[in-house]
Image (cartoon, grey):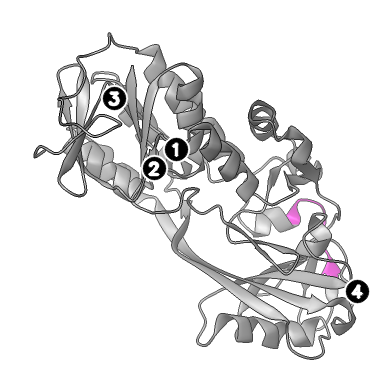
Amino acid sequence: MSVAVVGAGIAGLSAAWELTRAGAEVTVLDSERRVGGVVVTERRDGFIIEGGPDGWLAAEAHLPALAEELGIASHVVRQAAKGSLLWNGTAFERLEEGRAASLLGIQARLEDVKAGFASFAGGMGELVQALAAKVKGRVKTPLGVTGIAQTGRGWRLAVTGGMVVDADAVVLALPMYSAARLLEAAGVSGARHLAEAVYFPSLTVSLAYRENQVGRPLEGTGYISPSGTAIRAVTFSSKKFPGRAPNGHVLLRVFLGPIAGEPAAVAHHELREVLSISGEPLWGRAFFWSRGIPRYPRDHAAHVAEVRHRLERLAPLAIAGAGVDGTGVSACVQSGREAARAVLRRRAPRRAAAPAQALPGRYSAQSP
């Protein structure tokens, strides 16, 4: 069975791994050169910097199970600090457990939040690297999918550069504003409603300091700021997880709202007052996602269920990702794997091989 996975974020890579384990012939397509989507980990001067999510709720079982399969279970680390603060403009107030998650829009059960968060010793990029290694040679970038059409019992995907990919099944692990367009092209009525999920922009800045530059003790995992300030929240990254900064140093991750000015400078200016910081940061690294975390409309789950019901009438095609099944890393992993299992359950007889002129991965240079 040949399967095209469209999207090489965590959901897409998880789907590709599940399909590979089942013996499917997998091709992963993504319009970006880098895999992993919004999961980005960088290293600098002994610091580990996250550009996207920095972990997952430790109570959720999907990530540990996947880490075990990938051989990186020993790299899982638990949250080192506990508790969150609220900056009221003049002083810190301790928040009751679970309140910070609620204020930040993290939808989770209180008991799960109380169990804390987990990550990887080398950052969340370890998960991307491990998944990419398992599907090595099957990922084709930068190749975006511009159209999709059913051909008998399978699918033909139009790919940038004038090529096409033929597959028995497809997993669309894309943001819903892209996936909905392809689903509509495939004749899935009602798919446009999935695009109603709004992807809000996200701007974060990681700032490094020497420990002796920070005059106020860093307690807990970070703090939330009141409305009206540039800073929405701050994570004490070097306190939250072990190994995020070299000895004698502090790493702070700042979540900013809309600002005018250079992000690192704006973040440092406010932090200087709140945390009694002296001098300038050693460096700053900003990450901006113009379409970051999706927020679902009230009837989103019903639209997803209806679209999935309609997909059952077509050749094997499944949808996955943060735009349908939840925004956390664990939810994306589960979504991708479930999408892979959905198309595997509808396994069709193997079709004839692609034409002789096709490129590896069942590419063909003919017009879509």
Q: Earlier in the sequence, mark 4 or mark 3?
A: 4
Disc 2 + disc 4, Cβ < 8 Å: no
Q: Nearer the viewer, mark 2 or mark 4?
A: 2
Residue segment shown in magenta: 93-99
> Circles 2 and 1: CB distance less than 8 Å?
yes
Residue 6 in view, yes or no: yes
Instruction: From the image, state whether disc 3 or disc 1 is nearer to you.
Output: 1
Q: Amino acid at mark 1?
A: Gly
Return the x and y of residue 98 as percentages of the image width and height.
76, 51
In three-dimensional space, the C-alpha distance between marks 2 and 1, rounded to whole angstroms, equals: 5 Å
Q: Nearer the viewer, residue 41 or 310?
A: 41
The tally of labels here is 4
**Residue at image x 64%, y 77%?**
284
Between the C-alphas of marks 2 and 4, the distance is 42 Å
Amino acid at dot 2: Gly
- Observer-nearest of 146 and 299: 146
Q: Is 20 situated above or below 108?
A: above
In this orientation, does residue 95 appear? no
Q: Earlier in the sequence, mark 3 or mark 2?
A: 2
Under mark 3, the amino acid is Leu
Please say if 143 is above or below 232. above
Quarter of the image where one finds residue 43: bottom right
- Structural crowding at the residue carrying mark 3, measured as other residues with C-alpha within 10 Å and reported as few (<14), some (14–19) or many (≥20): some
State the image coordinates of residue 269 (x, y, percent, origin top left): 68, 88
At numbered mark 1, what does the secondary structure look like: helix, strand or loop? helix
- Point 91% across, 74% down: residue: 217
Cα separation, mark 3 vs mark 1, equals 18 Å
Q: CA distance from mark 4 to mark 3?
A: 54 Å
The residue under label 2 is: 7
Q: Which residue is mark 1?
A: 12
57 with respect to 358 (left or right): right
Q: Which residue is mark 4?
A: 217
